[in-house]
Image: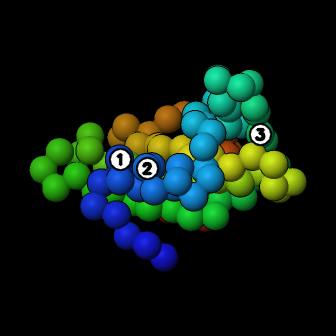
Amino acid sequence: MQSYETVTEALKDLKAKGFTVDFNIAFDKIICSDNKVCLNPNEFEITETYRFEGETNPSDEDVVYAIESKDGKVKGTMTSAYGMYAETVSIEMLKKLSVHK
């Protein structure tokens, strides 16, 4: 798997690889507000993850996920803070994301 120095570098390269949808966590699903795509944990797979740790600031800690719908029609990325800055998520979503951290 490739490694990246920054979150921006990872997102740019993944976009060039076809991961063009920008997802956000919405408690028990991931959504894209631009095109209204909404996927539940059983509807997508995480194909790649990249973890970034802040050298001096814990708020710089982040994970980049490359996500693909199980039907193969939607590919996108999502970033998520971890530790004390992590979003509130459902148990199902937490299980899905933690397998890949």
User: Seen from this angle, which residue lies furthest front?
Assistant: 16
Left or right of 85 in this view: 17: right
Judged from the image, the secondary structure of the residue bearing numbered disc 2 is: helix
Q: Which residue is mark 3?
A: 39
- Circle 2 Cα neighbour tier, 10 Å, few/some/many (<14 / 14–19 / ≥20): few
Callout 2–callout 1 Cβ contact below 8 Å: yes
Q: Nearer the viewer, residue 38 or 98?
A: 38
Q: Which residue is mark 1?
A: 8
Q: Residue at x 56, y 47 (%)?
A: 77
Q: Position of residue 34 (x, y in %)?
A: 64, 23
User: Seen from this angle, which residue lies furthest right?
Assistant: 71
Q: Nearer the viewer, mark 2 or mark 3?
A: 2
Q: Which residue is mark 2?
A: 12
Residue type at mark 3: give it: Leu
Residue type at mark 2: give it: Lys
Q: Is residue 96 visible?
A: no
Left or right of 70 in this view: 21: left
Q: Residue at x 26, y 44 (%)?
A: 60
Q: Nearer the viewer, mark 1 or mark 3?
A: 1
Q: Nearer the viewer, mark 2 or mark 1?
A: 2
Judged from the image, the secondary structure of the residue bearing numbered disc 1 is: helix
